[in-house]
Amino acid sequence: MVRGFAAATVLVIAGLFQSVAVAADIRLGTWNLMRLGQGETSYEAIAAIAATVDLLAIQEVMNQTGIERVETAVEARTGEAWSVIVSSPVGSTRYRETYAFLTRDSAVTYDEGAVLYLDRKNVFIREPFSAKFRTAAGATFAIANVHILYGKRESDRIPEIAELAAYWAWLKEVYPGEELLLAGDFNMPPSHAGFAPLRRYARPLVTSGASTLSHTSGKFANLFDNIFVAQDSKLTITAAGVVNYPSMLGLSHSQARAYVSDHAPIFVQLGRGRLPPGVQLIPQQKVVRVGAPIERTQPANDSRSGASRSPAPVHANRSSGIYHLPQGCPSYGRVSARNLEVFASEEEAVAARYRRAGNCR
């Protein structure tokens, strides 16, 4: 179910909000999906990654068709109901996009207060979009979705980055007492001095590594994507990092950029929420300790961890109806992005009526 919200009609009176002191046990993510709805996109590949979280903040939604196809694909993959809320179009006269929140209905639902920032100083080209959500356990929180202007030079981004501090203060007024998260594509690493005003109130959950795909497979260029939480957040965050989705799906960076996105998604685990087996992370991510004492988790493909590594996913070809195992199947990495289906196990592939490739040893 896709919901759209106009900025002028959903401004919520601050006094209507009350926080619920219940732990949030969910998985959140943010992903710039590179002009979603335009060009040749593998919605099945997007769904394979989106299905690993319960709420996904999405940037660069170009039309309704694109986000509806993501919702349809993730529902087909998981067998569960999902919902989408979409902002009004934002941008300039030459370029406009929308923000979206994709949610797994069994884990988290839209509560109220979806609104575009009332940018009275007209600083943002694309005004951020925010909403309040409620988990199945009754916990509430507000999350904002932002896509900072890239511009022609770094200095073009500074005004919007600096204005994020004022935006954070505005969010606190609109959602009083709620835990706040600010997610999106900032087009700037969190270490940049431009974030100094915001860093007085909020901190980034990912501080090392990179989230944009270079043209060389396995190499990532910039840490532009992130999730910020309040400096005094009470959320129990067990892990945060960057998902290495090209490696998970067996795609070269050329394929990934052409059919999925030039950005990798950021994830955060809250409370007892855990990423499923098969999720791979870009190495050397730091776990950010916020709120209560937490466990340290290692990336799924980090051989330094004493725990057993999560198995690589099974790749299936939608066109041929054949699946390939990560070991012993020579065509494992050769399935085109548009025909790729990804399963956590061979049992899942068989249950979906795929048959094993004959050349698997």
Image (spheres, grey):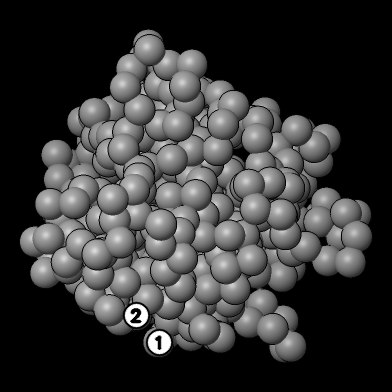
Which residue sits at x=45%, y=32%?
301
Q: Which residue is nearer to you in this view: 174 or 219? A: 219
**Residue 298 found in image quarter:** top left
Q: Which percent across, then down, holds residue 334?
A: 46, 65
Please name the residue that numbered disc 1 is placed on.
Answer: 65
User: Which residue matches tag 2?
Assistant: 69
Name which quarter of the figure residue 24 lies in: top left
Element carrying mark 2: helix
State whether residue 325 is above or below residue 83: above
Would residue 93 be visible to someone looking at this image? yes
Q: Amino acid at mark 2?
A: Arg
Q: Residue 47 location in percent, x, y?
A: 34, 65
Residue at the (34%, 48%) spot, across then down: 328
Residues at marks 2 and 1 touching, judged by CB atoms closer than 8 Å: yes
Task: Quote the CA–CA distance across marks 2 and 1.
Answer: 6 Å
Where 165 falls versus 78 (above or below)? above
Q: Secondary structure at mark 1?
A: helix
| Image: 234 above or below 105 | above
Q: Nearer the viewer, residue 76 or 318?
A: 318
**Is 294 in front, or is 40?**
40
Residue appearing at x 62%, y 60% in the figure:
253
Q: How dense is the environment of label 2, judged by Cα within 10 Å: few (below 14), some, or many (20 and up)? A: some
Q: Quadrant of the N terminus?
A: bottom left
Q: Is 130 placed above or below 20 here? A: below
Q: Dot 1: within a 10 Å radius of its alpha carbon, few (fewer than 14), some, or many (20 or more) residues? A: few
Three-letter code, disc 1: Thr
Residue drawn where x is 15% and y is 45% of the image: 136
